[in-house]
Image (tube, grey):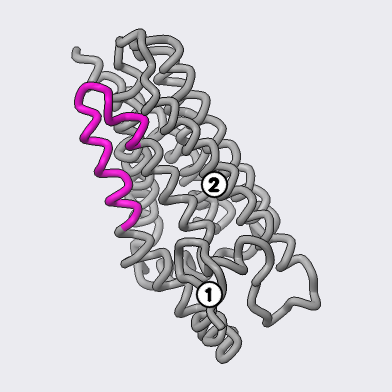
Amino acid sequence: MSPFLQLPLVSLAAVSAVMLIVWIWAYRINNAGVVDIFWAFNFLVIAVVIWLMAGGYETRKLIVCGLASLWSLRLGIYLLIRVGSHLDVEEGRYKQLREEWAPHTNLKFFVFFQMQALSNVFLAIPFFIIALNPDPHISMQEWTGAGMWLAAIIGEGVSDWQLKQFKKDPANKGKVCEYGLWNYSRHPNYFFQLMIWISVLVLAISSPYGWIAIICPLAIGYLIFKITGIPMTEEQSLRSKGGLYKEYQRTTSVFVPWFKKQ
């Protein structure tokens, strides 16, 4: 079997098995929100599969598996702390799905969890491409992509940490976070999330079939700007913070960190 088929198929089998176990757990605790935690950790599973099975240049394989693992662990641990701290309370979006999908809720959640596994493999396509590249020379473009990826992981982590610190202070209840990176962008976490996938594209583009990697930033960008990212977050913030958030919208860049408007 071609490695271009073998790696995705083995990865899909592995992460689908993980999501089956997570679905059983979610059913028992009546909280589908745990899927987010393991969606993040599944990239670590895929990185292990790539490391064990991909036949490309070892240094390049180390770079992509190392960065994918670092990002997966950072995001997974963050979500584990956030979701795991209140397992007895399901997040609102999953409560809404539970109502909409009745009376076949459990079956539909099973399909949903497996679709999350499929999305893991879809987004890992550039990882497969990079890891299978046998060229023993790593170009400056690849090093640039790797550096951008690491910087984006750090930026995403800092923005998440700053928001968490803001929310921890009871005095900030009902207020708008303008702490750190949030003073320069209304969604710095989404900015760095998209930068991660642009970085992966830069890293992948010099590999055979590397142009395929463009599907990832396009897909993530579409979700951020049109579906589950900025639109839903802004609507919720306007409902909960009203005029304070309208002023924040007026003065603060929606996406790219930039200076405040007067």
Q: Which mark is residue 37?
A: 2
Q: Which residue is mark 1?
A: 252
Residue at position x 53%, y 69% in the image: 186
Q: Is 224 located above or below residue 79 in the figure? A: below
Magenta span has 218?
A: yes
N-terminal label among 1 and 2 = 2
Q: Label 2's element?
A: helix
Q: Is residue 117 in view?
A: yes
Above-or-below relation of 96 to 144:
below
**257 to 198, vertically: above or below:** below
- Highlighted range, magenta: 201-221
Return the x and y of residue 18 as percentages of the image width and height. 46, 35
Displayed quadrant of residue 171: bottom right
Residue name at image x 57 percent, y 66 percent? 184
- Tag 1, which secondary structure? loop
Residue at x 42%, y 64% (from the top left corner)? 229
Q: Is residue 31 left or right of residue 113?
A: right
Question: Label 1: how many residues lie within 10 Å, few (<14), some (14-19) or many (20+)?
Answer: many
Residue 105 occupies quadrant? bottom left
Predominant SS of the magenta segment: helix
Q: CA distance from mark 1 to mark 2?
A: 30 Å
The N terminus: image quadrant: top left
Q: Is residue 146 magenta?
A: no
Across and down, in percent, residue 49 comes to: 42, 20
Looking at the image, how many numbered discs can be counted on the residues? 2
Residue 71 is tagged as none
Q: As rendered, which of 191 and 34 lies closer to the eye?
A: 191
Up-down relation of residue 174 to residue 232 (above or below): below
Tell me the kind of residue under disc 2: Ile
Task: Report crowding for label 2: few under 14, some 14 to 19, many 20 or more residues within 10 A (C-alpha).
Answer: many
